[in-house]
């Protein structure tokens, strides 16, 4: 007897997927994705009209963002009680999730899915409590996958030197500062809609807390920055290669470890803007003896103060209009 084909998604189930994807982290909270549902296949589309020419000229951070959205999409499918297969692609459709037959979601699936709405970009100092070794190991294991490596940086003095240099360059880059100002949304509260980084989510402090460098971001000397880095829990997300699929895989892994950290009452934020400077990633590989190409730096810990969520675009904008991408 032939087994029945997997059932197509209902409109309510599609709404669950859209809400999960909408809560993924993205560069400047630009939300550069859309969903196309085709029966039992769901395409995640890259919105190339969302461009950050100064911060992200090659679109690498945009692909990291889309990779994070794929992780949320996969979790939502599994929590709906369906098996699925994720295939990364190398065009405007960055990934296709093929939905299979019923499957009981695991407790881990539920834990990570529930963490989606609690995850925040915490651009503030952390509480002084260190992350326990067992929790740190669980976060690392969640992100490790074929072709993606998570590295606790050594030689923090060299990392501080490179981050300090990048901060000084970005403070003086007028084009970058104009673009950042355009993406800084002057929105407040927990019910704000739209895109961009809320002013309330930015920090007036120096790296590594600041995350986004503005003209008035303080620049500590290398010794002070080294001490501040040593007081934090840091992971560098590296990949074997530097192609589009590597960027997507890095973003997906980054979201898995971020959601794992969230499920354990931790918060985090990502540093990518220093890595956009010409030659800086190569210097990181050399100075820190990294096992691959650095794609992002993840800092995490226990929050000293709560962080409000970033605004999100209306769910209707998650779906392309007839005729293609908007």
Image (cartoon, rainbow, N blue to C red):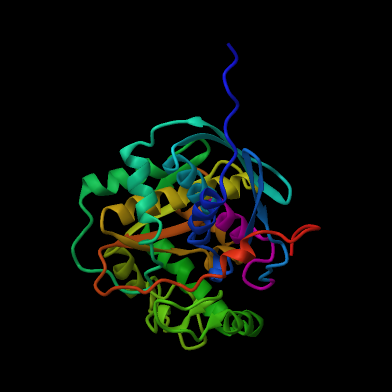
Q: Which residue is drawn at 74% across and 60% down?
A: 325
Image quarter hosting the N terminus:
top right
Q: Residue at x 43, y 62 (%)?
A: 159
| Vertical placement of residue 275 versus 90, above or below | below
| Vertical placement of residue 182 versus 60, above or below | below
Image location of residue 324, percent across then percent down: 78, 57
Q: Which residue is drawn at 34% across and 74% down?
A: 124
* The residue stretch that appears in magenta: 53-67
312 or 186: which is nearer to us? 312
In magenta stretch: residue 63: yes
178 or 236: which is nearer to us? 178
56 or 142: which is nearer to us? 142
Image location of residue 119, percent across then percent down: 38, 61
To which quarter of the image does residue 177 belong?
A: bottom right
Going by the image, does 273 lie left or right of 121? right
| Vertical placement of residue 174 versus 278, above or below | below
């Amino acid at each position: 007897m032939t087994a029945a084909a997997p059932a197509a998604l209902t409109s309510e189930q599609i709404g669950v997927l859209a809400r999960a994807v909408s809560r993924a982290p993205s560069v400047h909270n630009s939300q550069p994705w859309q969903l196309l549902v085709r029966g039992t296949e769901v395409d995640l589309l890259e919105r190339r009209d969302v461009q950050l020419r100064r911060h992200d000229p090659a679109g690498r951070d945009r692909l990291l963002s889309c990779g994070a959205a794929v992780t949320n999409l996969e979790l939502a499918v599994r929590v709906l009680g369906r098996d699925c297969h994720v295939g990364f692609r190398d065009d405007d459709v960055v990934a296709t999730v093929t939905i299979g037959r019923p499957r009981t979601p695991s407790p881990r699936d539920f834990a990570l899915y529930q963490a989606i709405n609690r995850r925040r970009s915490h651009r503030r100092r952390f509480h002084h409590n260190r992350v326990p070794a067992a929790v740190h190991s669980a976060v690392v294991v969640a992100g490790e996958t074929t072709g993606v490596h998570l590295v606790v940086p050594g030689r923090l003095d060299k990392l501080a030197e490179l981050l300090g240099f990048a901060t000084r360059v970005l403070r003086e880059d007028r084009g970058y500062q104009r673009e950042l100002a355009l993406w800084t949304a002057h929105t407040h509260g927990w019910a704000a809609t739209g895109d961009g980084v809320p002013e309330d989510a930015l920090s007036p402090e120096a790296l590594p807390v600041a995350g986004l460098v503005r003209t008035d971001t303080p620049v500590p000397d290398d010794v002070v920055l080294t001490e501040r880095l040593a007081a934090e829990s840091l992971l560098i997300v590296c990949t074997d290669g530097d192609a589009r699929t590597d960027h997507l895989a890095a973003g997906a892994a980054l979201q898995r470890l971020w959601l794992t950290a969230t499920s354990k009452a931790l918060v985090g934020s990502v540093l990518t803007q220093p890595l956009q400077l010409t030659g800086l990633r190569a210097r990181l590989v050399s100075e820190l003896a990294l096992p691959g190409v650095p794609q992002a730096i993840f800092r995490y810990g226990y929050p000293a103060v709560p962080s409000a969520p970033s605004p999100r675009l209306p769910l209707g904008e998650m779906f392309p209009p007839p005729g293609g991408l908007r």
